[in-house]
Image: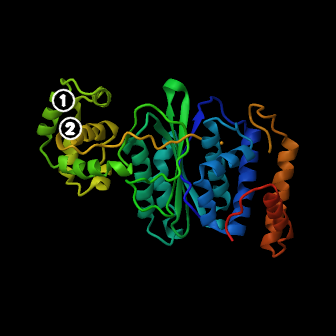
Amino acid sequence: MPRKTGTADLPLHGGRAPRWLFSRMVALGREVLYALTEEFGTLEVLRRLADPYWFQALGCLLGFDWHSSGLTTTTCGALKEALGQVGEELGLYAAGGKGATSRRTPQEILARGEELAVEPERLVYASRMAAKVDSAALQDGFQIYQHVFFFDRAGHWCVVQQGMREQDGMARRYHWISEGLKSFVEEPHAGVVGRRTGLVLNLVAQEAAPARGTIPELTREPPERLVGELSRLSRLQLPRRHRLLISDINPGRLRGVLLRAYESEARDFESLLGVQGLGAKGLRALALLSELLYGAPASFRDPARFSYAHGGKDGTPYPVDRDAYDRTIQVLRRAVRRARLGQREELAALRRLATALGAEPHGG
């Protein structure tokens, strides 16, 4: 299956799913996870969650706003709660969430360590790097506030995380998957979807390889020298792009960050990215110095390219039909339960219906 990971842009909406709807989202999400795992296995579930289009369709099926930022957080929350009920049985788990909950991701992954076929620290590292790339190495104006890490017993994983840009009321969703991922720091998002934004500093673009090579070399220079260069550059008449990059860099405040980077003795860009405290502004300063001192430019290409059953929470396209929602849960639950007893006729019928409606078949 080709990798379809990427981003999707959504308007920020206030409010939350009412309890009557969220409980149904959990119930239907649980049956969807049962059905997919029964038919295709856990890796296919992760593939689909990593597909921005499929994830959007799932959020619509579950009945949340078809195009709002809340679709991401509420769908992830419903799936996490569903997996809290059946995850051990399926061998599929979820960690993280919105706001402060996202910071508990490492602990929640480690808590599943005895059930996994791989060292859980490997998954903790993947979660941390995905969050660090989208918050620091890819600077597109969206601040990450939601991070959910889905993983299975075999150690396959995917990430669904979202950032917000308050000035224009937009959110952007980022999808990752372990399958086919060759590098955390070079084109980790394949098949990106979303709207273009303004100035972007993209240190994980393929064409930014020269910058990724020289930035770690820069951190081996004494921090005072780098601070001096930044102070000098801030007084120069630089081209517009560089003025924007340096506009909120305070060389004095960066001294401590540069010292930590210097002491880390990072071997390469990926290990440098993992240095605690080195965030967006520190990397922006190093990228600027990399280009102006060594002629190794970063990339300014936004990875986002244009691009999205039961009704919706706000009545769009129509109010949620509670009776129809409950019937869907019952039909899917019965089909899955019978399939697990060897009676696959109803699940096969649902699959034929999906094919007749034009859905692309997955798995085998």
Question: Could you tell me if the residues under marks 1 and 2 are in contact, i.e. CB atoms within 8 Å?
Answer: yes
Which of 100 and 303 lies nearest the eye of the viewer? 303
On the image, which quarter does residue 289 sit in? top left
Circle 2: is it few (<14), some (14-19), or many (20+) Cα within 10 Å?
some
Q: Type of residue at label 1?
A: Leu
Quadrant that contains the N terminus = bottom right
Disc 1 residue crowd, few under 14, some 14–19, many 20+, Cα 10 Å: some
Identify the secondary structure beneath mark 1.
helix
183 in relation to 71, above or below: below
Up the image or down, 44 lies above or below 234; here it is below
Q: Position of residue 272 (x, y in %)?
A: 28, 51
What residue is shown with label 2? Answer: 292
Asked if residue 319 can be seen in this view, the reply is yes
Q: Amino acid at mark 2?
A: Leu
Q: Is residue 8 left or right of residue 275?
A: right
Q: Nearer the viewer, residue 227 or 277?
A: 227
First in sequence: mark 1 or mark 2?
A: 1
Residue at the location (64% across, 35% down)?
A: 68
